[in-house]
Amino acid sequence: MCGIFCLLSLSPTQFEWDKTVCEHLKRRGPNWSQDVTVRGTSPFYQCLFSAHVLHMRGLLTPQPVQDNPGNVLVWNGEIFGGIPVRPEENDTAVVSERLSSCSSPSEILSVLSAIRGPWGFVYYQKAGDYLWFGRDFFGRRSLLWKVDAEVNALTLTSVAAHSTGSDQSAWQEVPAVGVYRIDLKAATEAGSVTFELYPWAYGGNNLVSSCSETVLESVPSGCTAVMNQSGLVLASPVCPLNTSIPKSLNEKEIHPNSHSRVKDLEQLLASKGKNDEVNSLIDVLSEAVRRRVQSLPFRDQDSSPPTDDHASVAILFSGGIDSMILAALADRHIPAHQPIDLLNVAFKLQEPKKQKESAKKPKKPKSKATDFKTDGADSQTSSPFDVPDRITGNAGLKELQDLNSQRRWNFVEINVTQEELQKMRQERISHLVHPLDTVLDDSIGCAVWFAARGRGFITVDNDQRPYTSTAKVKSDFALSRILNLFNFLPMKGICCSCSLGC
């Protein structure tokens, strides 16, 4: 994920931006860092753009991108459809070229609506002195905003800095309800910023009111948000959700016990129609995975080919159904001679269970339940990293090896001590997750951060060796959330939750 930043100042007073934020942004983009400043003279305004590129596909394109007319783009996203991108092309350059050819708001909205993939952006349109920014329909790329009233400045950034003082609540997420436009001349003359909202076209009759309510809840103090007067919207990338309930499921609710779940699944899969629907879902997921794992940095003919020792793709792997499906589908689209890294994170337990039990009770003969072990369980049961995800991860690894024994599956054991967790949470992770601050945000943030770092151990011929994943594409998805809904909600509740993006 690239680091993007824009500081809009409506005052001629020199304003220094937070150097801590700058350092966090630089870590997001190790391949290129650059600043560009644009100024308006009548009336005065100043926009400082800073971009830090993580090169993911095509040829390396420096950011910010400034074209001949003077438009400036900072882009944090990837295009997997909707707009053609050739293997040697970089999506940032493609988006910049498309936006540069636009002469009206409707044309800009048409370009953004066509993009299939995650994105966040800030775009300075010199003709008209406009500043556009926003996130994709699902808000899959971070973009935050904050206003410094004392110096009359608005900051947009993909990464902020967590603080414990009075400034800690100043950063807020830009609501992913559409894209925003600021008329820089009007803002300078008024001495305050007004966001003009162009919403996504979903939500039925309550579109305008629901979007306005969402934006008003998080609009920075001293700013104003209004719906665009022309009535323009972004076309939703999501097809209308099928909310019809199969008759067999409508007659009775699914019971939460395992026997009834298995019976229900057997009934659903007994018909050819249901099997066709299952295969269609697998095909859709497979195509999504194919686009992800095959969208890699472009390699010209003169460069040396990649070695078979290093994986180009890594999967955040817990051995659960979501990561197992992802790994199995990736196996379809990556040549068998190329390894795949399976990144498995384990946070060290405070004290192994066996030690706790031995401290409290005298030793007893092992029962049948404790006699059960998988291969290598002698070392696993006494390991402080013997957490559920490590156990299911090892079991999943065996299934993948059976699925394709020709491929080298690098099961990377990423062991995190409590001391390292606390250190990196304070130095890095809390800033990346900010302003989100729930326990779930912290838990997911920590697991993803250590997995993305890719530093751990692999076992080769019973010998454990240090290993760092070199893969640029690291993926995971949350199918398990839908399966959990299936366990606890009736079908109507599942349809409602999915339609809301829950």
Image (cartoon, rainbow, N blue to C red):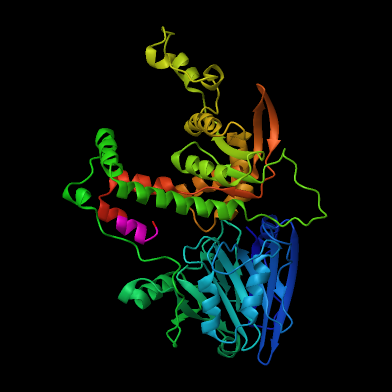
- Does the segment drawn in magenta span residue 326? no
Residue at 65% across, 31% down: 458
The image position of residue 30, as x and y in percent, is 73, 56
Residue at 29% across, 36% down: 262
Is residue 155 something one can see in this rendering? no
From the image, give the main secondary structure of the stretch colored magenta.
helix
Q: Which quadrant holds residue 48?
A: bottom right
Residue at 68% across, 77% down: 72
Quarter of the figure that contains the C terminus: bottom left
Q: Which residues are magenta?
A: 495-501
- Does the segment drawn in magenta span residue 499? yes
Is 390 or 48 nearer to us in this picture?
Answer: 390
Quarter of the figure that contains the N terminus: bottom right
Is 352 or 336 nearer to us in this picture?
Answer: 336
The image position of residue 276, as x and y in percent, is 36, 50
Q: Which quadrant holds residue 434?
A: bottom right
Q: Which quadrant holds residue 77?
A: bottom right
The image position of residue 63, as x and y in percent, is 71, 68
Q: Residue furthest top?
A: 365
Q: Residue furthest bottom?
A: 42
Is residue 486 something one can see in this rendering? yes
Q: Residue furthest left?
A: 251
Relative vertical location of residue 170 with respect to residue 252 in this rendering, above or below: below
Q: Residue furthest right?
A: 302
The image position of residue 169, as x and y in percent, is 51, 62
Task: Please indicate whether residue 489 sits to the left or right of residue 454 in the image.
Answer: left
Is 322 or 169 nearer to us in this picture?
Answer: 322
Relative vertical location of residue 96 with respect to residue 244 in this rendering, above or below: below
Relative vertical location of residue 5 with respect to residue 110 in this rendering, above or below: above
